[in-house]
Amino acid sequence: MERPVRQSVSLPPKIARRVKALARSRKASANRVIVDLIQEGLESAENERRRFLDLADRLSAATDSADRQRLKAELARMTFGE
């Protein structure tokens, strides 16, 4: 097991209140909640990256014009939003 690295993070008051409320509801420390939220965010970003690369691979392999258009539109939504 790796040793934890101590970091100092300043949170805006509104987010700090939400973290404390979440910690109370989970019966956990605010530190544990922050670690969990960061971990979930990192996993989410990695999943989004994998999904994007998968779509790009599918686009490059697609031969059907309609399928290519659909994949291009989906990639555009991921890149630029709705």
Image: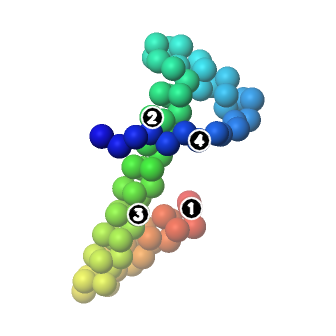
State the residue in front, 14 or 65. 14
Mark 4 secondary-structure assignment: loop
State the residue in front, 7 or 34. 7
Q: CA distance from mark 1 to mark 3?
A: 15 Å
Q: CA distance from mark 3 to mark 2?
A: 20 Å
Q: CA distance from mark 1 to mark 4?
A: 33 Å
State the residue in front, 73 or 16. 16
Taking the view exactly as shown, the residue that stands out farthest to the front is 3
Q: CA distance from mark 2 to mark 1?
A: 27 Å
Q: What residue appears at the point 72 percent right and 29 percent down from the top-left corner?
A: 14
Q: Residues within 10 Å of mark 3 (few under 14, many from 20)?
A: few
The residue where tag 1 is placed is: 81
Q: Residues within 10 Å of mark 2 (few under 14, many from 20)?
A: few
The residue where tag 4 is placed is: 7
Q: Amino acid at mark 3?
A: Arg
Evaluate if marks 1 and 3 touch, with contact meaning CB atoms under 8 Å apart.
no
Q: Amino acid at mark 2?
A: Asp
The residue where tag 2 is placed is: 36
Q: Amino acid at mark 1?
A: Gly
Precedes in sequence: disc 1 or disc 3: 3
Of labels 2 and 4, the one closer to you: 4
Q: What residue appears at the point 67 percent right and 23 percent down from the top-left corner?
A: 17
Label number found at residue 49 = 3
- Residue 19 placement: quadrant: top right
Residue 8 seen anywhere in this rendered image of the structure = yes
